[in-house]
Image (cartoon, rainbow, N blue to C red):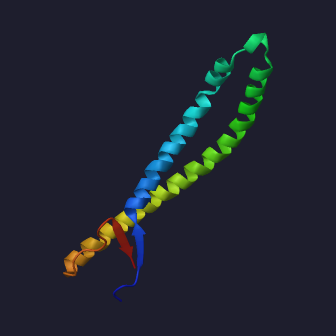
Amino acid sequence: MAGDGVLYPIDDLKTTSAQLIAIVDEFEAASKRRDDLEQAVGRPDGDDRLKSRVHDFEGSWDDSRDKLLSKLKEISERVKGTVDEVTKTDTDMAGSMQQSGQGTGGGRGRAVAN
């Protein structure tokens, strides 16, 4: 029936996918900057306590960051997979509709799946 189906905001999903990839990249780069932070703190007045606290915090945060990074990668892959599948389905359906003379589907960055 006309009007039945689901609208997928492909442009929004593509933007979300790109943003998630950037976040994943930032999280991966952050773990490599750990030593930079400890170096920046140094030993104020010859005291190692602040550097030690920074080291402890970074160790705890590394564990949390790794868990969060794993989840972000999973979400990123799922969003990208959704974009890929909906785009493929939209393209396939548009091709079928053109062959049958019914016009094209989707439009304006939105794919329609029935």
Viewer-closest of 3 and 88: 3
In the rendering, at what x and y percent does residue 70 appear? 62, 47
Q: Residue at x 59, y 28 (%)?
A: 32
Taking 74 as reference, is 36 above or below it? above
Viewer-closest of 41 and 107: 41
Taking 114 as reference, is 89 above or below it? above
In the rendering, at what x and y percent does residue 38 appear? 68, 21
Q: Is residue 42 left or right of residue 17?
A: right
Q: Quadrant of the N terminus?
A: bottom left
Viewer-closest of 27 and 49: 49
Q: Is residue 84 visible?
A: no
Q: Quadrant of the C terminus?
A: bottom left
Q: Residue at x 65, y 18 (%)?
A: 39
Where on the picture, by quarter, is residue 83? bottom left
Where on the picture, by quarter, is residue 99? bottom left
Q: Is residue 96 left or right of residue 16?
A: left
Farthest residue, direction bottom? 1
In the rendering, at what x and y percent does residue 58 appear? 71, 31
Q: Is residue 78 visible?
A: yes
Taking 96 as reference, is 80 above or below it? above
